[in-house]
């Protein structure tokens, strides 16, 4: 009523506004970034209402205002899924998830539970992570049939016995070591878990008559400059080489960083900001692709049901985001000014890090699927 959004700084100054409310739950991430920059220019506090999909789901109400989160600025347009196709491909199946207690694996378990499986089979070698997802399923999905197995995917005898006993129809292989600098001098663990572990699990899937096997891969497998990326590229090759040798269809899904994962830069920046800084960024020009964990898992499920076998599905990650921008915005959203209240230190690239990541090789024939985000 008082003017367009470009006039926010002028209106705030003229009318002595105390608080700005961003009541635009359907705004895209780029629109939110523009609005937040205008609000930040006023020096006044600002809040937002929940996103539109949360309002429509009934999970929250319009009255639940909250601070703007970094996810609001980095998330993207809500995705539209073919839920009937997903449920048609997954409902009534016995589904096994390795790494079921991890960041990706646990969210995948939650999403799969909503798809109506006959049974979920949870596998993880971390005791606490497995316990935590077990407790959550018991509370949230009391009627869901599931089993859990504290098991290392590099244990050949245990993997073979598990598949003989459980006979899963579909496997999502999310178990992996993923921390790039840590794995640079941990070759035995990286190759053992990411390569040999994948070989054991997908061979067991083929031997027991699984219908589909889905490997969770990473953009770091493209022109790998580090041990982690190289091991995941090998895992991709293993799955493609096995496709066609049995009725099991082997499918790979490749994507970039996810917000909120255990090894994500976001919780690191939050801890550094909470103690007053400095926030450490490796290089002023380093950039990464980001998506939220729920979005990634929904697209993994979609890819699983549209795959015919042998494909590497690449998720549409949008535009890459500079880590410097991420750090600056997180500092501002905490009520501080970067460089004044909280310093940003550039500490140099860590072992195995690249300035930017890629989602596919030039030699790979990138073609569209019937889903615009895959």
Image (cartoon, helix red, strand yellow):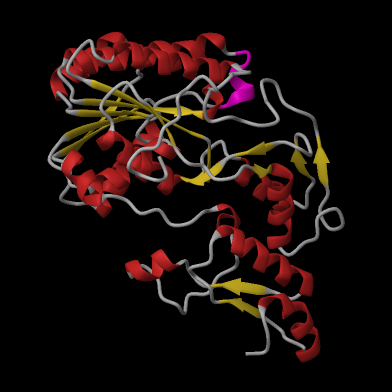
Residue 181 in view in this figure: yes
Q: Quadrant of residue 216?
A: top left
Residue 157, position as x, y percentages in the image: 26, 9
Q: Is residue 67 above or below residue 148?
A: below
Residue at x-position 73% and y-position 65%:
335
In the image, what residue occupies the spot 48% across and 17% down?
233
Horizontally, residue 29 falls left or right of residue 167, namely right
Name which residue lies at 41% across and 48% down. 294
Q: Quadrant of residue 145?
A: top left
Q: Is residue 97 left or right of residue 227?
A: left
Quarter that holds the C terminus: top left
Residue farthest right in this picture: 340
Magenta residues span: 179-185
The residue closer to the viewer here, 281 or 309, is 309
Q: Nearer the viewer, residue 66 or 80?
A: 80
In the rendered view, would you say 202 is above or below 174? above
Residue 350 occupies which quadrant of the picture? top right
Examine the rendering and report whether any part of residue 135 can be seen.
no
Q: Considering the image in quadrants, where does the N terminus appear?
A: bottom right
Magenta segment includes 345: no
In the displayed structure, would residue 195 be above or below residue 218? above
Q: Position of residue 298 (x, y in %)?
A: 35, 45
How many numbered markers are drawn? 0
Query: Which residue appears at 18% of the width and 25% of the height?
Result: 211
Percent of width and height locating residue 9: 77, 78
How far from the left and from the top, in percent, is residue 367? 41, 32
């Amino acid at each position: 009523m008082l003017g367009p959004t470009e006039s926010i700084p002028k209106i705030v100054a003229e009318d002595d506004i105390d608080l700005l409310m961003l009541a635009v739950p359907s705004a895209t991430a780029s629109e939110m970034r523009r609005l937040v920059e205008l609000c930040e220019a006023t020096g006044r506090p600002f809040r937002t209402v929940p996103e539109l999909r949360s309002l429509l789901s009934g999970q929250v109400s319009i009255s639940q205002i909250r601070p703007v989160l970094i996810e609001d600025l980095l998330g993207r347009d809500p995705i539209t899924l073919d839920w009937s196709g997903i449920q048609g491909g997954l409902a009534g199946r016995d589904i096994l998830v390795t790494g079921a207690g991890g960041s990706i694996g646990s969210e995948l378990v939650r999403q799969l539970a909503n798809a109506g499986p006959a049974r979920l089979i949870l596998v993880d070698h971390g005791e606490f992570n497995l316990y935590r997802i077990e407790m959550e399923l018991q509370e949230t999905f009391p009627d869901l049939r599931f089993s859990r197995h504290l098991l290392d995917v590099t244990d050949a005898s245990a993997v073979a016995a598990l598949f003989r006993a459980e006979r899963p129809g579909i496997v999502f292989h999310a178990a992996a070591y993923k921390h790039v600098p840590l794995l640079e001098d941990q070759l035995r663990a990286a190759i053992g878990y990411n390569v040999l572990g994948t070989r054991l699990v997908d061979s067991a899937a083929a031997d027991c008559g699984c219908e589909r096997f889905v490997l969770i891969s990473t953009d770091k497998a493209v022109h790998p400059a580090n041990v982690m990326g190289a091991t995941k590229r090998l895992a991709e090759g293993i799955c493609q080489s096995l496709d066609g040798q049995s009725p099991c269809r082997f499918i790979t899904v490749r994507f970039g960083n996810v917000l909120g994962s255990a090894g994500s830069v976001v919780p690191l920046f939050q801890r550094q900001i909470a103690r007053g800084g400095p926030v450490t960024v490796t290089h002023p020009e380093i950039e990464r692709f980001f998506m939220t964990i729920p979005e990634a898992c929904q697209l993994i499920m979609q890819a699983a049901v549209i795959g015919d076998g042998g494909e590497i599905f690449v998720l549409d990650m949008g535009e890459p985001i500079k880590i410097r921008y991420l750090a600056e915005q997180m500092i501002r959203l905490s009520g501080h000014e970067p460089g004044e209240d909280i310093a940003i230190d550039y500490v140099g690239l860590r072992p195995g890090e690249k300035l930017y990541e890629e989602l596919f090789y030039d030699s790979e024939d990138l073609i569209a699927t019937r889903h615009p985000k895959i």
